[in-house]
Amino acid sequence: DGGITQSPKYLFRKEGQNVTLSCEQNLNHDAMYWYRQDPGQGLRLIYYSQIVNDFQKGDIAEGYSVSREKKESFPLTVTSAQKNPTAFYLCATRRALMTVGDGYTFGSGTRLTVV
Amino acid sequence: QQPVQSPQAVILREGEDAVINCSSSKALYSVHWYRQKHGEAPVFLMILLKGGEQKGHEKISASFNEKKQQSSLYLTASQLSYSGTYFCGTEWGSQGNLIFGKGTKLSVKP
Protein backbone atom coordinates (compact mmCIF):
# COMPACT_ATOMS: atom_id res chain seq x y z
CA ASP A 1 0.00 0.00 0.00
CA GLY A 2 1.48 3.35 -1.03
CA GLY A 3 1.67 6.20 1.40
CA ILE A 4 3.64 8.79 3.30
CA THR A 5 5.47 8.07 6.54
CA GLN A 6 6.34 10.89 8.87
CA SER A 7 8.46 10.28 11.93
CA PRO A 8 8.58 10.74 14.78
CA LYS A 9 4.93 11.33 15.68
CA TYR A 10 5.95 13.46 18.69
CA LEU A 11 9.23 15.35 19.12
CA PHE A 12 10.54 17.46 21.95
CA ARG A 13 13.25 20.03 21.34
CA LYS A 14 15.37 21.90 23.82
CA GLU A 15 16.15 25.55 23.28
CA GLY A 16 19.04 26.00 20.84
CA GLN A 17 18.80 22.50 19.35
CA ASN A 18 18.40 21.55 15.72
CA VAL A 19 15.97 18.72 15.04
CA THR A 20 15.13 16.84 11.85
CA LEU A 21 11.68 15.61 10.87
CA SER A 22 11.52 12.70 8.48
CA CYS A 23 9.16 12.35 5.51
CA GLU A 24 9.31 9.26 3.29
CA GLN A 25 6.93 8.35 0.47
CA ASN A 26 6.48 5.31 -1.76
CA LEU A 27 3.83 6.85 -4.04
CA ASN A 28 6.41 7.69 -6.71
CA HIS A 29 5.25 11.31 -6.54
CA ASP A 30 7.58 14.00 -7.84
CA ALA A 31 6.39 16.95 -5.75
CA MET A 32 6.81 17.11 -1.98
CA TYR A 33 5.83 19.83 0.48
CA TRP A 34 6.25 20.83 4.11
CA TYR A 35 3.49 22.74 5.88
CA ARG A 36 3.28 24.05 9.40
CA GLN A 37 -0.05 24.13 11.23
CA ASP A 38 -0.79 26.33 14.22
CA PRO A 39 -4.20 26.53 15.92
CA GLY A 40 -6.51 28.86 14.01
CA GLN A 41 -3.90 29.62 11.33
CA GLY A 42 -4.51 26.99 8.71
CA LEU A 43 -1.55 25.41 6.92
CA ARG A 44 1.42 27.56 5.98
CA LEU A 45 3.97 26.49 3.38
CA ILE A 46 7.59 26.11 4.54
CA TYR A 47 9.39 24.50 1.57
CA TYR A 48 8.53 22.49 -1.50
CA SER A 49 10.38 20.42 -4.07
CA GLN A 50 9.44 19.18 -7.51
CA ILE A 51 12.55 17.23 -8.33
CA VAL A 52 15.58 15.67 -6.69
CA ASN A 53 18.25 18.19 -5.64
CA ASP A 54 15.91 21.15 -6.15
CA PHE A 55 13.62 22.92 -3.70
CA GLN A 56 12.00 26.34 -3.21
CA LYS A 57 11.15 28.43 -0.17
CA GLY A 58 7.56 28.85 0.84
CA ASP A 59 6.01 31.67 2.84
CA ILE A 60 7.68 30.88 6.19
CA ALA A 61 11.07 29.30 5.33
CA GLU A 62 13.14 31.28 7.82
CA GLY A 63 14.65 29.02 10.49
CA TYR A 64 14.08 25.85 8.46
CA SER A 65 16.15 23.87 5.96
CA VAL A 66 15.43 20.90 3.70
CA SER A 67 17.18 18.50 1.35
CA ARG A 68 15.97 16.30 -1.49
CA GLU A 69 18.71 13.80 -2.22
CA LYS A 70 16.28 11.01 -3.11
CA LYS A 71 12.86 11.14 -4.74
CA GLU A 72 11.34 9.27 -1.80
CA SER A 73 12.68 11.46 0.98
CA PHE A 74 12.25 15.12 1.96
CA PRO A 75 13.53 15.75 5.51
CA LEU A 76 12.92 19.04 7.28
CA THR A 77 15.41 20.47 9.77
CA VAL A 78 14.12 22.94 12.33
CA THR A 79 17.12 25.03 13.30
CA SER A 80 17.79 27.03 16.44
CA ALA A 81 17.09 30.15 14.36
CA GLN A 82 13.39 29.25 14.34
CA LYS A 83 12.17 31.17 17.37
CA ASN A 84 8.76 29.61 17.77
CA PRO A 85 8.93 26.05 16.44
CA THR A 86 6.16 24.49 18.52
CA ALA A 87 3.59 23.37 15.92
CA PHE A 88 2.15 20.45 13.98
CA TYR A 89 4.23 19.73 10.86
CA LEU A 90 2.69 18.08 7.83
CA CYS A 91 4.43 16.60 4.83
CA ALA A 92 2.46 16.26 1.60
CA THR A 93 3.05 14.92 -1.88
CA ARG A 94 1.54 15.38 -5.31
CA ARG A 95 2.10 13.40 -8.49
CA ALA A 96 3.87 16.40 -10.05
CA LEU A 97 4.09 20.09 -9.27
CA MET A 98 1.55 21.04 -11.91
CA THR A 99 -0.83 18.11 -12.13
CA VAL A 100 -4.28 18.96 -13.36
CA GLY A 101 -6.94 17.37 -11.21
CA ASP A 102 -4.72 15.91 -8.49
CA GLY A 103 -4.91 16.78 -4.83
CA TYR A 104 -2.30 16.47 -2.13
CA THR A 105 -1.71 13.35 -0.08
CA PHE A 106 -0.70 14.18 3.48
CA GLY A 107 1.35 12.27 6.01
CA SER A 108 0.06 11.82 9.55
CA GLY A 109 2.20 14.66 10.89
CA THR A 110 4.82 15.34 13.54
CA ARG A 111 3.96 17.35 16.63
CA LEU A 112 7.00 19.34 17.74
CA THR A 113 7.18 20.90 21.19
CA VAL A 114 9.92 23.09 22.61
CA VAL A 115 10.74 22.26 26.26
CA GLN B 1 -2.70 36.27 -0.14
CA GLN B 2 -4.36 33.69 2.04
CA PRO B 3 -7.92 32.87 0.94
CA VAL B 4 -10.67 33.87 3.35
CA GLN B 5 -13.02 31.18 4.59
CA SER B 6 -16.42 31.77 6.15
CA PRO B 7 -17.92 30.99 8.51
CA GLN B 8 -15.13 30.21 10.99
CA ALA B 9 -17.28 27.64 12.75
CA VAL B 10 -20.70 26.06 12.35
CA ILE B 11 -22.75 23.68 14.49
CA LEU B 12 -25.32 21.46 12.86
CA ARG B 13 -27.80 18.78 13.85
CA GLU B 14 -27.66 15.54 11.90
CA GLY B 15 -29.54 15.91 8.64
CA GLU B 16 -29.07 19.68 8.34
CA ASP B 17 -27.26 21.41 5.48
CA ALA B 18 -24.28 23.76 5.52
CA VAL B 19 -22.34 25.95 3.11
CA ILE B 20 -18.69 26.92 3.53
CA ASN B 21 -17.25 29.71 1.41
CA CYS B 22 -13.72 30.42 0.22
CA SER B 23 -12.78 33.76 -1.36
CA SER B 24 -9.55 34.88 -2.94
CA SER B 25 -8.21 38.32 -3.84
CA LYS B 26 -6.36 36.83 -6.82
CA ALA B 27 -7.57 35.10 -9.95
CA LEU B 28 -7.67 31.38 -9.30
CA TYR B 29 -6.53 28.46 -11.39
CA SER B 30 -7.98 25.84 -9.07
CA VAL B 31 -9.50 25.34 -5.64
CA HIS B 32 -8.99 22.26 -3.48
CA TRP B 33 -11.11 21.19 -0.50
CA TYR B 34 -9.80 19.09 2.40
CA ARG B 35 -11.28 17.79 5.66
CA GLN B 36 -9.20 17.30 8.79
CA LYS B 37 -10.29 15.38 11.87
CA HIS B 38 -8.75 16.41 15.17
CA GLY B 39 -5.11 15.29 15.44
CA GLU B 40 -5.12 13.71 11.99
CA ALA B 41 -3.86 14.62 8.54
CA PRO B 42 -6.08 16.54 6.11
CA VAL B 43 -7.86 14.35 3.57
CA PHE B 44 -8.44 15.47 0.00
CA LEU B 45 -12.13 15.85 -0.91
CA MET B 46 -12.17 17.39 -4.36
CA ILE B 47 -10.56 19.83 -6.74
CA LEU B 48 -12.31 22.40 -8.91
CA LEU B 49 -10.65 23.88 -11.96
CA LYS B 50 -11.47 27.25 -13.46
CA GLY B 51 -14.52 27.03 -15.66
CA GLY B 52 -17.25 27.10 -13.02
CA GLU B 53 -17.76 23.36 -12.81
CA GLN B 54 -19.45 21.74 -9.87
CA LYS B 55 -18.19 18.51 -8.39
CA GLY B 56 -19.63 16.04 -5.94
CA HIS B 57 -18.39 13.57 -3.38
CA GLU B 58 -21.16 11.55 -1.67
CA LYS B 59 -23.46 14.27 -0.26
CA ILE B 60 -20.72 16.88 -0.41
CA SER B 61 -20.46 19.04 -3.51
CA ALA B 62 -18.69 22.25 -4.45
CA SER B 63 -18.84 25.03 -6.99
CA PHE B 64 -16.22 27.42 -8.33
CA ASN B 65 -17.11 30.88 -9.58
CA GLU B 66 -14.03 32.04 -11.45
CA LYS B 67 -15.40 35.53 -12.03
CA LYS B 68 -16.04 36.10 -8.33
CA GLN B 69 -12.82 34.28 -7.38
CA GLN B 70 -14.65 32.15 -4.88
CA SER B 71 -15.67 28.60 -4.20
CA SER B 72 -18.39 27.14 -2.01
CA LEU B 73 -18.60 23.71 -0.39
CA TYR B 74 -22.10 22.29 0.13
CA LEU B 75 -22.79 19.63 2.75
CA THR B 76 -26.29 18.21 2.54
CA ALA B 77 -28.08 15.97 5.02
CA SER B 78 -25.04 16.11 7.29
CA GLN B 79 -23.84 13.03 9.15
CA LEU B 80 -21.83 12.77 12.37
CA SER B 81 -18.84 11.70 10.28
CA TYR B 82 -18.79 15.10 8.56
CA SER B 83 -17.46 16.74 11.72
CA GLY B 84 -14.00 18.22 11.35
CA THR B 85 -12.23 21.28 10.03
CA TYR B 86 -12.61 22.06 6.35
CA PHE B 87 -9.84 23.84 4.48
CA CYS B 88 -9.81 25.34 1.04
CA GLY B 89 -6.50 25.50 -0.79
CA THR B 90 -6.07 27.86 -3.72
CA GLU B 91 -3.76 27.68 -6.68
CA TRP B 92 -3.19 30.74 -8.86
CA GLY B 93 -1.21 29.50 -11.77
CA SER B 94 2.04 27.74 -12.46
CA GLN B 95 3.55 28.01 -8.99
CA GLY B 96 2.36 24.49 -8.23
CA ASN B 97 1.64 24.88 -4.55
CA LEU B 98 -1.44 25.58 -2.49
CA ILE B 99 -2.20 28.47 -0.16
CA PHE B 100 -4.69 27.34 2.47
CA GLY B 101 -7.41 29.25 4.27
CA LYS B 102 -7.63 29.24 8.06
CA GLY B 103 -10.32 26.59 8.06
CA THR B 104 -13.96 26.19 9.05
CA LYS B 105 -14.74 23.99 12.03
CA LEU B 106 -17.88 21.95 11.47
CA SER B 107 -19.54 20.13 14.38
CA VAL B 108 -22.44 17.80 13.70
CA LYS B 109 -24.52 16.85 16.76
CA PRO B 110 -26.94 13.92 17.09
Image: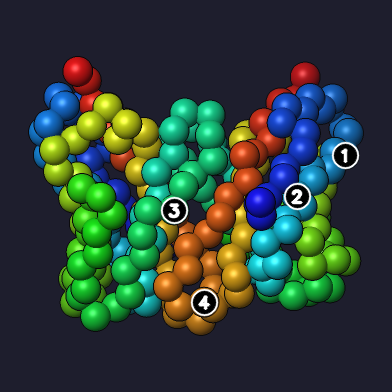
Task: Label 1, secondary structure: give it.
Answer: loop
Query: In which image quadrant can residue B48 be found?
Result: bottom left
How many badges with numbers are in the image?
Answer: 4
The image shows residue B9 at horizontal and vertical percentages of: 26, 33
Query: In which image quadrant can residue A54 be found?
Result: bottom right
Taking the image as drawn, is residue A43 in sight? yes
- Camera-side residue: A92 or B57? B57
Q: CA distance from mark 2 to mark 3?
A: 19 Å
Q: Is B48 left, or right, of A48 in this rendering?
A: left
Q: Amino acid at mark 4?
A: Thr
Residue shown at 79%/67% (left/top)? Answer: A71
Q: Nearer the viewer, mark 1 or mark 3?
A: 3
Chain letter of disc 2 in the image: A
Earlier sequence position, callout 1 versus callout 4: 1
Q: Are dots 1 and 2 in contact, CB under 8 Å?
A: no
Q: Which mark is residue A18?
A: 1
The image shows residue A30 at horizontal and vertical percentages of: 68, 71
Residue hosting label 3: B44
Earlier sequence position, callout 2 versus callout 4: 2
Q: Are dots 4 and 3 in contact, CB under 8 Å?
A: no
Residue hosting label 4: A99
